Image: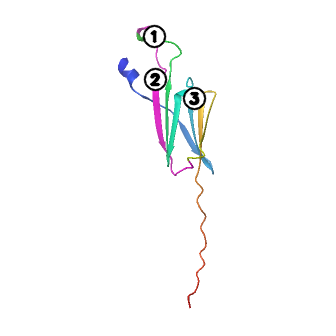
Amino acid sequence: MDELQEQEGKLNIDVYQTENEFVIQSTIGGVSEKDLEILVSGDTVTIKGERKPPEEVLPESYIYQECYWGKFSRTIILPEPFDDEKVKATLKNGILTIRLPKLRKKEAQKIIIKSED
């Protein structure tokens, strides 16, 4: 049992995109914003946190133990870079939502060729 508690849990996520942004969502009930850390860089997002049990229970007292308590993390690599200065994260009703605006690709510019005659 101690071995299981020392391991880090994996965070389940949904990732989708709209025309203007990438969105990452995860159900993380029982975790407060002070127990979460979100790191962004280039095309990568890492979510780290800890789910603390609401009360201390001796391991031998459990009949079933399916909930994960402890540290967890997840790193997501997105298909293209995003604007890491405009990322927004919210936590509402146990659902973490991270919105990552896509970087605007410059439209092709027409280059005028000047004759040097």
Q: Nearer the viewer, mark 2 or mark 3?
A: 3
Residue visible at 48% across and 12% down?
56
Mark 2 surroundings: few (<14), some (14-19) or many (≥20) residues within 10 A: some
Q: Which residue is mark 2?
A: 70
Q: Nearer the viewer, mark 2 or mark 1?
A: 2
Outermost residue, left direction? Answer: 3
Between 55 and 84, the one lying in front of the other is 84
Between 101 and 39, the one lying in front of the other is 39
Residue visible at 46% across and 33% down?
73
Q: Pinpoint residue 25: horizontal percent, then vertical percent.
A: 57, 36
Outermost residue, bottom direction? Answer: 117
Mark 3 surroundings: few (<14), some (14-19) or many (≥20) residues within 10 A: few
Residues rendered magenta in the picture: 60-83
Circle 1: residue type: Ile
Residue 81: in magenta span: yes
Circle 2: residue type: Gly
Q: What label sits on residue 85 in the rendered view?
A: none
- Cβ–Cβ below 8 Å for labels 2 and 3? no
Q: CA distance from mark 2 to mark 1?
A: 19 Å
Q: CA distance from mark 2 to mark 3?
A: 15 Å
Q: Pinpoint residue 38: horizontal percent, then vertical percent.
A: 52, 37
Q: Pinpoint residue 88: horizontal percent, then vertical percent.
A: 61, 40
**Left or right of 91, for residue 47:** left
Q: How is the image coloured?
A: rainbow
Looking at the rendering, which quadrant does residue 98 occupy?
top right
Q: Which residue is mark 1?
A: 63
Q: What label sits on residue 33 in the rendered view?
A: 3
